[in-house]
Image: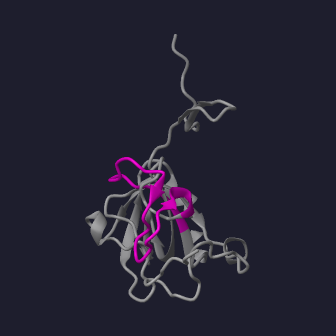
Amino acid sequence: MKPKKNPKSYTQPFKQDGSGVIEMSAIGVVHSPFKERFAAPRQADLDNPAQGMIELKGGFNFEQALTDLDTFTHIWVICWMHLNQGWNPTVMPPRGSDVRRGLFSTRAPHRPNSMGLSVVKLNKVYKRTLYIEGLDMLDGTPVLDIKPYLPYADAMPDASHGWLDPEVPFPFQRSVKT
């Protein structure tokens, strides 16, 4: 007799050396005005924020899981960048950089695992639908998780700008020459 898989388990055995397989299931999907990768902003446009929705799947009691989320103004959305194919260890960051950078020192979308992380403004929660703005995700993007944005924990005022020039505002960010 085949053992039943634990319905709450999303992972298979993961080894101490970092090998193994991690399984995830989308909990919902993004409805966005951005249909193609080139049309989506590299970072959310705060001056002209795009509006969209996240529709969570039915049959999982997500309505109850959304209880109290509407008391937060912003949320983190962890998603799967489903149209990406492949990755490179170095990239030319968009919008002005003229130096190849290590992938992990950028927010380039082509990652070894196509996970995305976006903070968006939460306007309303209705049943299993979240109405959001300031998104940079494509229409049809699978949502893996949602967490509240906590200003005291998520905003680090003493954080470094790394190789980016803090004096040049987005979207005209230029790299610092070294």
| Nearest the eye: 101 or 57 | 101
106 to 21, vertically: above or below: below
Q: Which residue lies furthest to the top in this view?
A: 1
Specify whether residue 89 is painted magenta: yes
- What span is in magenta? 76-105
Task: Answer with left or right where residue 86 lies relative to residue 122.
Answer: left
Residue 171 percent coordinates (x, y):
43, 83
Residue 43 percent coordinates (x, y):
44, 74
| Nearest the eye: 41 or 149 | 41
| Nearest the eye: 17 or 129 | 17
Q: Which residue lies furthest to the left in this view?
A: 35
Instruction: Name the dominant secondary structure of the magenta segment.
Output: loop
Specify whether residue 163 is painted magenta: no
For image coordinates 63% across by 35% down, the residue present is: 18
For image coordinates 57% across by 79% down, the residue present is: 73
For image coordinates 58% across by 69% down, the residue present is: 69
